Amino acid sequence: MAGVEAENDLSREESRMIELRFHGRGGQGAVTSAEILATAAIDEGKFAQAFPSFGPERRGAPVIAFARIDESQIRDRTAIQQPDVVMVLDPTIMKIVKVTTGIKPTGMLVVNTSRGRAAIAELTGFTGKLATVDATAIAMAEIGRAITNMVLLGSLVKAAALVEAGTVEAIIDRRFGPMLGKRNIRAFRRAMEETDLG
Amino acid sequence: MAGVEAENDLSREESRMIELRFHGRGGQGAVTSAEILATAAIDEGKFAQAFPSFGPERRGAPVIAFARIDESQIRDRTAIQQPDVVMVLDPTIMKIVKVTTGIKPTGMLVVNTSRGRAAIAELTGFTGKLATVDATAIAMAEIGRAITNMVLLGSLVKAAALVEAGTVEAIIDRRFGPMLGKRNIRAFRRAMEETDLG
Amino acid sequence: MARRVGMEVSIALAEAAKLANVDVISAYPITPQTHVVEHLSELVADGELDAEFIPVESEHSAMSCCVGSSATGARTFTATSSQGLALMHEILYIAPALRLPIVMCVVDRAISGPISIWNDHSDIMAERDTGWIQTFAENAQEAVDLTIHAFRVAEHPEVSLPTIFNLDGFILSHMIEPVVMPEREQLAAYLPSFVPLQRLDPTKPITMGPVGIPPVYTEAKWTQEVAMRNALPVIEKCWDEFEQVFGRKYRSIETYQAEGADVLLVTMGSIGETAMTYVDQARASGVKVGLLRIRLWRPFPKQAFLEAVAGAKALAVVDRCMTLGGVGGPVACELKSALYHEERRPKVVEYQAGLGGRDIPVSDFDRMVQGALAVLAGKRVPEPRVLQVRE
Amino acid sequence: MARRVGMEVSIALAEAAKLANVDVISAYPITPQTHVVEHLSELVADGELDAEFIPVESEHSAMSCCVGSSATGARTFTATSSQGLALMHEILYIAPALRLPIVMCVVDRAISGPISIWNDHSDIMAERDTGWIQTFAENAQEAVDLTIHAFRVAEHPEVSLPTIFNLDGFILSHMIEPVVMPEREQLAAYLPSFVPLQRLDPTKPITMGPVGIPPVYTEAKWTQEVAMRNALPVIEKCWDEFEQVFGRKYRSIETYQAEGADVLLVTMGSIGETAMTYVDQARASGVKVGLLRIRLWRPFPKQAFLEAVAGAKALAVVDRCMTLGGVGGPVACELKSALYHEERRPKVVEYQAGLGGRDIPVSDFDRMVQGALAVLAGKRVPEPRVLQVRE
Amino acid sequence: MTQAFKFPGWKDLPLGMDILEPGSARRNRTGDWRSERPVWALEKCVKCAVCVIFCPEGCLSVTEEGYPQVDLDYCKGCGICANECVTACIAMEREVE
Amino acid sequence: MTQAFKFPGWKDLPLGMDILEPGSARRNRTGDWRSERPVWALEKCVKCAVCVIFCPEGCLSVTEEGYPQVDLDYCKGCGICANECVTACIAMEREVE
Amino acid sequence: MKGFDLLGVYSARLMEPGEQVVSGHRACQGCGEVLAMRLIHKELGPNTVTCSATGCMEIISSSYPDTAWAIPWLHVAFENAAAVASGAESGYKALRRKGKLPAHLADKKITFVGMGGDGATADIGLQALSGALERGHDMVYVCYDNEAYMNTGIQRSSSTPFGASTTTSPAGKKSIGQQTWKKNVTEIAAAHRIPYAATASPSFPFDLMAKARRAAETPGPAYLHVYSACPTGWRPASDLAIELGRLAVQTASFPIYEIFDGNRVKV
Amino acid sequence: MKGFDLLGVYSARLMEPGEQVVSGHRACQGCGEVLAMRLIHKELGPNTVTCSATGCMEIISSSYPDTAWAIPWLHVAFENAAAVASGAESGYKALRRKGKLPAHLADKKITFVGMGGDGATADIGLQALSGALERGHDMVYVCYDNEAYMNTGIQRSSSTPFGASTTTSPAGKKSIGQQTWKKNVTEIAAAHRIPYAATASPSFPFDLMAKARRAAETPGPAYLHVYSACPTGWRPASDLAIELGRLAVQTASFPIYEIFDGNRVKV
Ligand SMILES: Cc1ncc(C[n+]2csc(CCOP(=O)(O)OP(=O)(O)O)c2C)c(N)n1
Ligand SMILES: Cc1ncc(C[n+]2csc(CCOP(=O)(O)OP(=O)(O)O)c2C)c(N)n1
Ligand code: SF4
Ligand code: SF4
Ligand code: SF4
Ligand code: SF4
Ligand code: SF4
Ligand code: SF4
Ligand SMILES: [Mg+2]
Ligand SMILES: [Mg+2]
């Protein structure tokens, strides 16, 4: 199913579940990106879950969302404690939240930043895989607003190939409608190109 | 305690419980008479209960009330099925309700009637003790309204001496206040005199 | 000295609440609770009781007002029944969580549908998880005594929990019967004035009722459970003190003729008295039967219960409520659960009876005990049975 | 053919209600039920579902409208949670007494206080006496399937009882996960149109909801109990038919790795899935443990339960609710009651966990099973324990 | 003490305890409640039917000739008809034993 | 991922889970929510304090000299002050990473 | 003529026969409330579905096995008659639109009625009423105002007039009786800008019946507030219900009027 | 000057320091509702006891262990804030009269506030409110009207204006959005003939605060209906709450006025 060769070593043996955590701010669409990722995986015949952190968080406040992807049925519904992948949608989050908490040493950090890999590596102290992208710039350019969630999905697909780009694009198209869909897909594609995997 | 000699043979040995049923119409005070009787017994140091039939009966509808008197604590709260005494406050009730239902053969029927003992004996077919009184006439004369409940209590005290007249009178006085109390006591006393015990 | 008088039970307990000098009464009328609140209104109108009587527009608001009132440190009382209790349901969970020592009289009545104004325990049983202390009265005296005890316990600084005392509707609430009314001096000796442990006080502002996020909800509920467990000895102690002041003795679990009994009838509420009559008769005819009355239902006095049934071979348990589609009535269910791991476990034969105002006569107790005896003689334990179902 | 899609569980079950072509939806929003009714509003606004959506002003009215609607013969649906369910409490008893086949989705959430929007079963457990049929879903597929099954069962002429299907709030309701959506044709084959057994019809006027005076109340309640008992085989039969049409199999009591298990974990709701993961791990390391999931809670499938536990030496029962001051959690209490007179009774070790949104990780199941194993090894059965209480 | 109606066994209770017979309360002869009965002096009656409309029991009807007619099976003897009669032709008389 | 507050054990929970410390929410630095911050050109400021009154956070105060002053620990960056300033002397600037 | 106008007197005999509330009900002797209920339902006729609150009118008309109702009738609880009626109206509406009604009902115009006493309306059921009015169901809500909770023994309601002594607002050494002013539910209903709200009294039976008809014929929600004398609760003789109602209207202690779309019209 | 009158502009700086609702609450960026709440409580000052309904303002101000409240504050449930406040008022009243208050409270004049959103007020808590107003408690009830159930995700309330699209009154092929007209709770409250009812908006902060004070100083019940813009629910940018409120008032889509004893006075 995952026909593309993974560009990294997140091991993809049968039934190795991949767990992801998304960091953003209330209103920025962290949940939506988790959702689209999971839906894509499901559309590809895999098993997947996506869920928000279940709190009454308000617009502006830091929020998280989760996703799981697996080849077989997922039975765990508890919060993800040790993610394989952490996605950071908003660069300013890192100042206030320790985004690397619990991340597996073999895991991957996907970050929206304009400051480049080195700065992020230093800031987070994370020594595993790192993917960076200036998602805000891409989003401003392509969508006209700093809504970075589809951009980051592009980086993720590039970095970890958990799902195919085409599947995600189809969902974006379905979900956002022709106008906004097209813009988001452009942003998504640019991320696939511009993401820095080191 | 029951200092007066009973005028009939309702046996008064220790712990022989006396059960009474009162028939009247909603709004006529059947419950009040049961209540005053029980309170009188309690005031004399006995044990007693009084309670209405627990229904949403409306003004005018036939209603019943109950009382129990005993020398020792009463533990039964169930409806009285086999009364020792049945009191009929309203003569017209007998046409529509079988007032003798369940009454003990050794029991007593106390009836407000203007028609005399024989007519009642025939009407009810009851062969036990019978006490009759023209309570409506007495009530109209003494109280000015056809409220017969205190009259019938007089008949009962006369007929069965379950409590002393003085105790009842004290309660009537307390309960109805000086004006109405006095009238009711007069009616009560007349009943003690005018009740026909056969 | 304390006077022995004939009084309607509802009036008597309202008088007891007056003696407790309650500050706020917030209640909504419902049969058969009405006489309680009517009498209290009269006492207030006549100036015999100095209290705010809040004539709310529903029971939901009755309980809500009680919460607000109790949170100011006022001694707060209410009473209800059946549909009214059900309408309070949501708020009934909240008062104990806030640890507010409201006292409530529940005049037990069947729950609709079909609508019934008559007595059973289906209303109160629905509140068995809520965290209120709950006792049951059997007669006028107990109703009065438990009223006073309820205030003592609820406000006890080691307890601070709302407390319900139950009495059966009509069959107890509407009875005129003898009762010894406590005297003011006795009350003064027994019931101290209420010193709230928390209060809405502008000079010491606290926030009551915040959100219980997941890191703290479990702990909050656990403290409630611990409070219930800790209340148990205090409740007993308050009965000991009650005996000293008033001379009448109460226990969480009370037995009658239990010694040497093979079968124990288990009752809660006023039917216990009829059951005693039955036990006397049965004992007289040689049946080894006794009676166990559950006076304290919440917190459930498990230890006392286990001790009380230790010698029995079978229990005949009467539930005044059905758990529709469940394994049995709520009381029997709980008793079996309590007994489950005991070495010597009596058989438990379950009955549901006295529903929606149907009397339980002496003969019904006999049927129950005969049922239990049949089990002891080797018959299979029957499924829980509703008595007196007309075929 | 039926499509496998990724969908939020709330949306999926709302779609299932749409497939059932409900006529009237009367609901009030409350977290975490909101997405269910929001999606239904959208379907109605878009004309995808032809139904009356009654935007009531409270849950009390939501259920009241459902009663009125169902009494006209309309297929009626609602959904709620927690405080909302509690506010319906009074009316929840009445719908089954009137034998109205309303279907309700309860998105289980802890009950206040303290207020919590997170999952446990304290809301629904308070309704265990009411007379609603109740099932529990574990995942998206089950939520969808039980929605459809609920209509089938509720309206079945041999049943005619309102039905609740439960799903855990957030942890299930807000999950996006794979689900196979039934097709219209399948629905047509499985779910006949609703033919009401009674209806407010001016040409055949009936009086619904009269007073249940004492001579008839007991009988009325008994018919409800009988209806619940009779519903049990119908519920199972409707699952059999479900399997024929949809190919997915459900049972009142379902087991996993139960064969040869010394200890059976007993769960209800979505934690069953985590428990399966644990069981797999434990089995792999040689622990003889299995899982029993209660899918049907009301009417309680006693026989199936007894058969399922026949081989087990101990049960580790998880309650998602506390009975404050009671003998233990409601599920464990009922299970012990069901087992009480069995010859071979497993030990029952009780846990209360996952309260107010606290996760129950695999390690917790291990603790529970270890507790049960310790009992089998001779340790005294511990008092019911709340897991994860921070000291 | 008299209960004409025989309550059904549980199996015969209608679904939901519905009452299937409209107006079955007619079996309930509320005339029993009466301690006074209305008596008409029809000669004074102007056939206006005011008494009929005001009877809470609905137990008054109009005869072919236009006169009011009471169904004593239901008349509770409230006296409203007498009090409202425009020509005062109704008197309330005590029921005899 | 950071939870500064250490939740008490059950024994240390106040009765009824009351919060005993008034205004304890001050520990919650909502400045973290901000992605833009208000910046003042005080030379244009007329010291009217309109910005101060309209701030939903109550995080503006008035200095001794009468100028508004922001507490960035709490400012969520909503922009209301900037939008309402009578002399348009407040600008919203994106927070840097 | 006791204030009964001549026209009124003679139109009485024009009344249709046929009752929806039959004799044999258990209301007190001389009950003004049951009279109002009878007249309203007589006017509305057989194609009416009535949803009743708990209260006197429910208890006295529907004690199993006796029903005084000749129309389909549903009682659920005390505080929700307006909600139950909303549900019934919506059920029919949906079934009709979807063509799901059986043939004999498909074209029948049905009037949906919610009803309750003043307690059920002004107090415990006010919210359900407000919700129903706001949502715009095509129904008639009738409040029978006897100014107290009579069914449970004459307790005060918010509709009890100032100074009246009831069992929960008794006059006493420290109280004159009811200490609050009568809540005006008709005004509250009218503040919902519903198309029709009116007050009436069975002492003016044709007026009452005409208003009932107008209420039924109004599309959308209509509110009818009916002053209903209660001899048991008010403690006069049993023959005075009509007279008392007439007096209340004539002295304007209970004015009768109509409000269309929120604009008051005196009658 | 954005419609802000000059006097208003300069009086802002005369405001007392001191807040009862402190920074650190979790309301959304730019929330107009929390601003209204802050200003009202600032005006009422520390001798205030507030009883809150469930809703945005409760959730964002009282998540254990964080409270934004510097005054005594109590939350019980969604639908009963008015009843809870009645209880608190009565508790103090009884204790004071009976001389049972501790010395430091005996002479303190305390303002009792019940508060809730439009859902808590116009819908699920309307009855508790009506009861409290009718009984005449000396308290202030504040409704923060953001025209929907925001706390649970923008569902319609009866205060949502006609045509507005919410998550439970979505615009769609068969619907324009909300199909009912905004319920006027102020009119409903005024129909209770309470001494003081008013509408206000935090966009006119001195007016709002003056009304809050008047409400508190009125003996008996007072009702304050506050239009509270919600950027999250209404979906504009986060800096527009004040502007939108001002616009609503100026276009009379939300008129602000006062009603004394039922008689309306425009402001
Ligand atoms: C939730 C609830 N609370 C209280 C009651 C008790 N109750 C039944 S009817 C009634 C009073 C009815 O008064 P009203 O609505 O004015 O009607 P009336 O009997 O006066 O005609 C009361 C208090 C109830 N059935 N349900
Ligand atoms: C009985 C009950 N039903 C539903 C809820 C869920 N709920 C909590 S707050 C809320 C909406 C609040 O809306 P509103 O009162 O307008 O306040 P806002 O959040 O808009 O300020 C809802 C539906 C609840 N807590 N309790
Ligand atoms: S007395 Fe009353 S019940 Fe009898 S006919 Fe006259 S009005 Fe009707
Ligand atoms: S009111 Fe009098 S005059 Fe008129 S019809 Fe009746 S009896 Fe005749
Ligand atoms: S941006 Fe918003 S929160 Fe920050 S100071 Fe300005 S008004 Fe206050
Ligand atoms: S609103 Fe503008 S001018 Fe006025 S004080 Fe604030 S910054 Fe200065
Ligand atoms: S109490 Fe009053 S309203 Fe009720 S039935 Fe009797 S007279 Fe009619
Ligand atoms: S949702 Fe609206 S009302 Fe609620 S906190 Fe956010 S902005 Fe304020
Ligand atoms: Mg009334
Ligand atoms: Mg709102």
Image (cartoon, coloured by chain):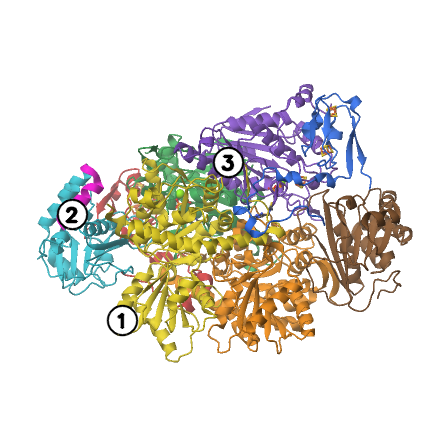
Chain colours: A cyan, B brown, C orange, D yellow, E blue, F red, G purple, H green
Classify mark 1: helix, strand or loop. helix
Is D177 part of what is drawn in magenta? no
Identify the mark nearer the N-term, 1 or 3: 3
Kindly identify the amino acid type of the residue bearing the numbered disc 1.
Arg
Q: Which contiguous range is marked in magenta?
A: A164-178
Q: Which residue is mark 2?
A: A167
Q: Which residue is mark 1?
A: D283
Q: Which residue is mark 3?
A: D201
C390 sits left or right of B182 in the view: left
User: What number is the disc on residue D35?
Assistant: none
The image position of residue D263, as x and y in percent, is 35, 72
Chain of the residue that carries numbered disc 3 in the rendered image:
D
Q: CA distance from mark 1 to mark 2?
A: 38 Å
Q: Is residue D107 visible?
A: no
The image position of residue E8, as x and y in percent, is 60, 49
Q: Quadrant of residue D319?
A: bottom left
Is A165 part of what is drawn in magenta? yes
Q: Residue furthest top?
A: G7
Dominant SS type (magenta): helix
| Residues marked 1 and 3 touching at CB (< 8 Å) | no
Q: Same chain, marks 1 and 3?
A: yes
